[in-house]
Amino acid sequence: MGRAFEYRRAAKEARWDKMSKVFPKLAKAITVAAKEGGTEPDMNPKLRAAIAAAKAQNMPKDNIDAAIKRANGKDSADIKTIFYDGKGAHGVQIIVECATDNPTRTVANVKAIFSKNGGEILPSGSLNFMFTRKSVFELDMPAKELDEIELELIDFGLTEIEEEDGVLYIYGDYASFGTLSEGIEKLGLEAKKASLQYIANSPISLNEEQMSEVEKLLDKLEDDDDVQAVYTNIE
């Protein structure tokens, strides 16, 4: 994927090492997943994925349990998942996923971040046709052959499988998240991360200088407390 990808990934990993930011976002993801699909992980693949992501970041069990319990509390009733579309320099398209109990505050913050960092917020839904929402699972490379894994998971909704730097990426349609999660577990494999992501239909390449410029905007978005994920069309 080139030096720009390596720069982006290294910068993102450095940001997410800030535990003061990571844990609240992970906890909110757990609460939202539990609210949407129930508080029993065995019956809720999205919650299982959120818990797995939290454990991968060494989030304490007490924090995880508290986040699940919060789904039944009064505070969780007002948490909504909202998406904002925007654009940055060099043709970069951006979808921002937020979980918030105050949309007025969140949209004001997101607009301000775009305008102050060389970007512009777009009308909601503007980029829907430029991205496809997919189920994405990340695993450590297993001992099994990729052909064997692919064959086994096709019936569970797998559409694509690839390996990059010792990480196995498994993709499926948006609606296949639950069945694909089940299939991975039946193979005795464990996903380090599992999420519903917006994948660009026509990715673009940036050089290192352009990436450095765009990173300023992406950094600010990802640092916002209400922002759960930022998706771009960068290759």
Image (cartoon, helix red, strand yellow):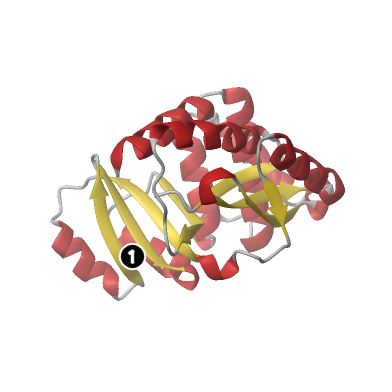
- Looking at the rendered image, the quarter that the N terminus falls into is top left
Residue 148: where, in percent of width, then height?
A: 15, 63
| 99 or 93, nearer to the observer | 93
Residue 200: where, in percent of width, then height?
A: 46, 60
| 63 or 93, nearer to the observer | 93
Q: Is residue 31 left or right of residue 90?
A: right
Residue 116: where, in percent of width, then height?
A: 73, 35
Q: Is residue 188 left or right of residue 234?
A: left
> Which residue shows up at 15% across the image and 53% down it?
144
Residue 140: where, in percent of width, then height?
A: 28, 43
Mark 1: few/some/many CA within 10 Å (<14, 14-19, 20+): many
* Circle 1 residue: 183
Relative to 51, residue 22 above or below = above
> Which residue shows up at 53% across the image and 62% down it?
43
Relative to 51, residue 117 above or below = above
Residue 177 visible to an observer of this rendering: yes
Residue 57 visible to an observer of this rendering: no
Q: How many marks?
A: 1
Task: Give the residue type that dot 1 points to.
Answer: Gly
Q: For numbered disc 1, what is the local secondary structure?
A: helix
> Which residue shows up at 33% across the image and 65% down it?
183
